[in-house]
Amino acid sequence: MVFPRLFHLVARVERGLTGQAIPLNDRELCVAVWARLKRSFPGAPACVLMPDHAHLLAEGDPGQLRRRWARALSSAVRDASWRWEPFPLPAPIPNAQHLARQLRYLHLNPCRAGLCSDPLEWEWSTHRDWMGCVDPSWPEVERWGRILGWWGTGGPERMHRYVSSDPAVRVTGTPPISAGHAKVEECSVREVLRAVAASRRVTVDVAKMPRLDRRLVVKLAAECSGLRPVQIAARLGLTRQAAARILRRAPPSARARAAVLQVLSDPRTRWDRFPPGTDRRF
């Protein structure tokens, strides 16, 4: 198998007018940046957004990649109070062994920075895509898994064990994502909403959610929360008629549903708090 022309791209935030780094810690901003990068670099094997920088692995011509990287990030972030540092030249990734090390490096960034204790806890990382927690997945995990020689039976587990077996996490590694479905009694409407937003990489604002994702929230809330449609509607800010109409429609795809349940099934991927300004009626 011919190894693709693969490169590691990095972007760092310049210090703002106040002299402080402007962090990428606003979830709505991350949604916009992630969506733009995913459109610009389809099938890329890995990406991570950190509070003040970003990493991406992508294939193509290095000059074109650098220009596309700069254009995508600059168009996604239009805050005049801060800007990106000059974008460095992409670093080549010559072979599968180097790719494995780069995947591990990117997915461990949040842990090594002390932002979380397990790579599965960081939402803005393609590690979750590799583990089946996101649908549709950004990386072409089967293709890259074959290039690495890791795919087939136990591929995701092997990937997680390799990434997490680091002193920043645990030398022996951490368990892979929990199998099976979350228990119904453990899932509130808020947790279902957050799990859908995480697995689909969309806003937590129900009114601004794409229609199919809103349907996924209502359908799974009815399945997992044990509440009546009128109660679900009240918690989501929907009318009773809108919730009932959604519940009469066709169920979401099996893959989308499985990804949400995967998020709900593991405490490392569940999210029990909302960012500042989020509606807290839950």
Image (tube, grey):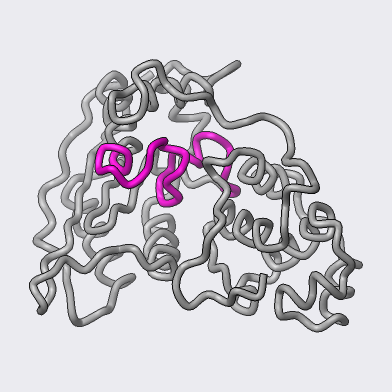
What x and y, as percent, mark residue 137?
A: 54, 45
Q: Is residue 133 magenta?
A: yes
Q: Quadrant of residue 247?
A: bottom right
Q: Compared with residue 78, is residue 122 higher up or lower down, i.e. above or below?
A: above
What x and y, as percent, mark residue 20?
A: 13, 69
Q: On the rendered image, what quadrant is the N terminus found in? A: top left
Q: Compared with residue 5, is residue 53 higher up or lower down, i.e. above or below?
A: below
Q: On the rendered image, what quadrant is the C terminus found in? A: bottom right
Q: Quadrant of residue 31?
A: bottom left
- Which region of the structure is painted magenta? 109-136
Question: What secondary structure is the stretch in magenta mostly built from?
Answer: loop
Q: Is residue 135 visible?
A: yes
Q: Residue at x 25, y 69 (%)?
A: 74
The answer to whether 195 appears left or right of 218 in the picture is: left
Closer to us: 18 or 82: 18
Q: Is residue 21 magenta?
A: no
Q: Residue at x 80, y 52 (%)?
A: 224
Q: Residue at x 77, y 41 (%)?
A: 183
The answer to whether 113 appears left or right of 38 in the picture is: left
Q: Compared with residue 229, is residue 154 higher up or lower down, i.e. above or below?
A: above
Closer to us: 187 or 80: 187
